[in-house]
Structure formats: structure tokens, C-alpha cells
Image (cartoon, rainbow, N blue to C red):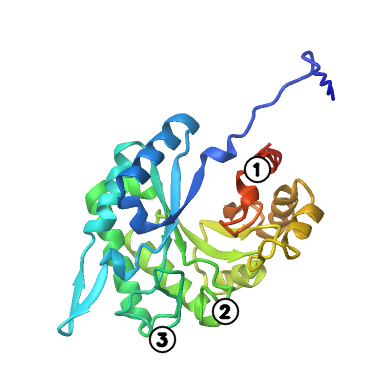
């Protein structure tokens, strides 16, 4: 079978937006301490020009960021520093997802993933805000205000899904308020945003809440996958994907732009499926899907 392409080289050209180079998603924070992860990230930056990386679980107990021992608050930013030191050293920047809940602040025992990330609201929002303020102040002291102003601080991950947030919408909005205030009290030019929801949800309500309470929103973030996140190979997930428009993310982003106006819009997660075990992630279809939605 032969396919013929034609190209009018006399037509007016336009700049190609390198949207793929803004941010890449990773797994969880602890993986970034591994030598193989760092080698892959170095290559990603050098060959693709990727500037930011986002991952879950910076505040998980396995990172030892905030613990309570013998009724004393213990803070250790060593592991987070090892990751950020590396990123800064190769010219990259973190897209800081502020999650999940340290055991010392959890209001319940609900967890997600094999690494047992706690997904409950803080039992003390003031202590949560204090933790965020301590972290951000530390990074400003370590990396300088100009560097940290170039980062993004995203509040939580997919709070509209029960798997990731055991509170209600109002609880997340409260979390955002305390977090945004803590960050802006360190420096008004630091960038904070959310709601990091799945499937473009909560955006009108989130923006209305922030506007009504005069809260800063330096960027809005959301996620989109054209398939059911809970689908398994062999059920209707493949059908969902085949029925989705080939440029589904482009269409979603254009629609979301009407809601968020001129605010910076970040799709911090997207792919043909959120299930990492689907074989088609390694098929030619996945490459074509990514190509179609990035051009």
C-alpha cells in the first residue's frame, strides 16, 4: 500500500509550539532519588528540551518531610533537596505537586497506591499551612527567590476522585486557601494553582470560590484521559478510546479555555489512558495519539 503526501512549500509558515517540552509526568517523589531515574531525566531534558517534571507524594512519610516522634514535630527536607538539587543542576525545574498527607497530619486512614499514600484532609489546617510555609521558605533560602519564582506549586492531585481525596469539595477549597496563603506569605510572586482535578471537573466552582475569597490563582490545572480510569483490558476501555476524537485533548483544552479565560491553563496529566498497564501505550497508536494532540 502506497500513501502520497503533498506539501506546499510556498505557503506561509507558522511557529511550532513545543508543548511537549514544558512538563513531563513521573511516578512518585521517592523514585527521583534513584540513579536510573535521574539518568533518564537528564536525557529527557537534553534531547527533548523538557523543562519541568511533576510527581506525586513529595509529602509522603517515605520522604520523611514531616514526622512526629516522642510528641515532637520533626522536619527533614533532605530527600526533597536531593531531588531538587539534581533538577536545578541539569537546568530543570520542579512542577511541585503538594501531596499527599503526612501521617502526622492525617485525619483518617484512607490510602491509595501500593506505597500507601494518605488521601485524607489535614486534621489541623494551620499545621498544614505551617508545613508548606516551612518548605517554601527553605527552598527560597536554598535556591534563591528568582529560581523558586519560576516553579509551579500545585495543590494536591485529583481531589474530585474519591480515591485521591476523602474530603468534600469544600474541604479541598479550604486546603487550597490555606496553601495559597502560606505560599504567598513567603513571596507574593510565587506561583500557586489548582484544582488539579480529573476530567476538567470543578473548574467553575473553583474559580468562583477563589474569586469570592480573593485568593490567588496563578494557573489552573486539570487532567484528561479519554478512557475510564477504572477500565481493564478486555472491557469497554478500548471502545471508549476508539470512539474518542483523535484530537480529544485539543478539543477539551479549547472548551476549558472558555471557562478559565486568560489564566494559564496546564494539563498536568493526559494520555490515551490513565492505566499504565495497557499494552497500547507501547503500540504505534500511542505515538500517533500523542503526535496528533501536540500539533
Q: Label 3 neighbourhood size at 10 Å, few (<14), some (14-19), many (20+)?
A: some
Image vertical order of residue 289 relative to residue 77, above or below: above
- Mark 1, secondary structure of its residue: loop
Residue under label 1, please give it: 283
Q: Quadrant of the N terminus?
A: top right
The quarter holding residue 273 reads bottom right
Is 126 in front, or is 291?
A: 291
Q: Is residue 43 visible?
A: yes
The numbered disc on residue 108 is 3
In the drawing, does residue 31 fall left or right of residue 227? left
Image vertical order of residue 268 relative to residue 130, above or below: above
The numbered disc on residue 169 is 2
Q: In the image, what residue occupies the spot 77% across and 46% down?
A: 246
Residue 39, position in %: x, y? 35, 39
Q: Earlier in the sequence, mark 1 or mark 3?
A: 3
Assess whether mark 3 and mark 2 are in contact (beta carbons under 8 angstroms). no
Q: Is residue 144 visible?
A: no
Is 99 in front, or is 143?
A: 99
Amino acid at each position: 500500500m502506497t500513501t502520497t503526501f503533498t506539501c506546499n512549500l510556498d505557503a506561509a509558515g507558522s511557529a511550532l509550539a513545543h508543548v511537549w517540552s514544558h512538563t513531563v509526568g513521573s511516578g512518585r517523589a521517592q523514585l527521583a532519588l534513584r540513579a536510573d531515574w535521574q539518568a533518564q531525566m537528564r536525557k529527557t531534558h537534553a534531547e527533548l528540551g523538557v523543562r519541568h517534571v511533576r510527581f506525586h507524594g513529595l509529602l509522603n512519610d517515605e520522604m520523611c518531610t514531616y514526622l512526629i516522634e516522642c510528641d515532637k514535630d520533626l522536619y527533614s527536607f533532605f530527600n526533597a533537596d536531593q531531588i531538587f538539587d539534581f533538577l536545578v543542576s541539569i537546568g530543570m525545574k520542579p512542577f511541585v505537586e503538594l501531596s499527599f498527607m503526612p501521617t502526622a497530619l492525617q485525619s483518617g486512614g484512607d490510602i491509595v497506591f501500593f506505597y500507601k499514600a494518605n488521601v485524607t484532609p489535614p486534621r489541623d489546617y494551620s499545621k498544614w499551612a505551617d508545613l508548606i510555609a516551612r518548605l517554601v521558605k527553605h527552598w527560597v533560602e536554598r535556591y534563591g527567590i528568582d529560581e523558586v519564582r519560576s516553579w509551579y506549586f500545585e495543590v494536591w492531585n485529583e481531589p474530585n476522585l474519591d480515591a485521591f481525596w476523602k474530603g468534600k469539595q469544600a474541604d479541598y477549597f479550604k486546603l487550597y486557601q490555606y496553601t495559597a496563603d502560606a505560599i504567598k506569605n513567603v513571596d507574593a510572586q510565587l506561583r500557586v494553582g489548582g484544582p488539579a482535578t480529573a476530567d476538567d471537573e470543578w473548574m467553575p466552582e473553583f474559580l468562583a470560590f477563589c474569586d469570592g475569597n480573593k485568593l490567588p490563582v496563578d494557573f489552573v490545572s486539570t487532567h484528561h484521559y479519554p478512557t475510564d480510569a477504572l477500565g481493564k483490558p478486555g472491557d469497554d476501555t478500548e471502545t471508549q478510546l476508539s470512539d474518542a476524537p483523535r484530537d480529544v485533548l485539543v478539543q477539551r483544552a479549547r472548551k476549558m479555555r472558555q471557562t478559565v479565560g486568560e489564566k494559564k491553563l496546564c494539563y498536568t496529566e493526559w494520555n490515551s489512558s490513565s492505566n499504565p498497564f495497557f499494552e497500547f501505550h507501547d503500540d504505534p497508536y500511542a505515538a500517533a495519539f500523542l503526535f496528533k494532540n501536540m500539533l
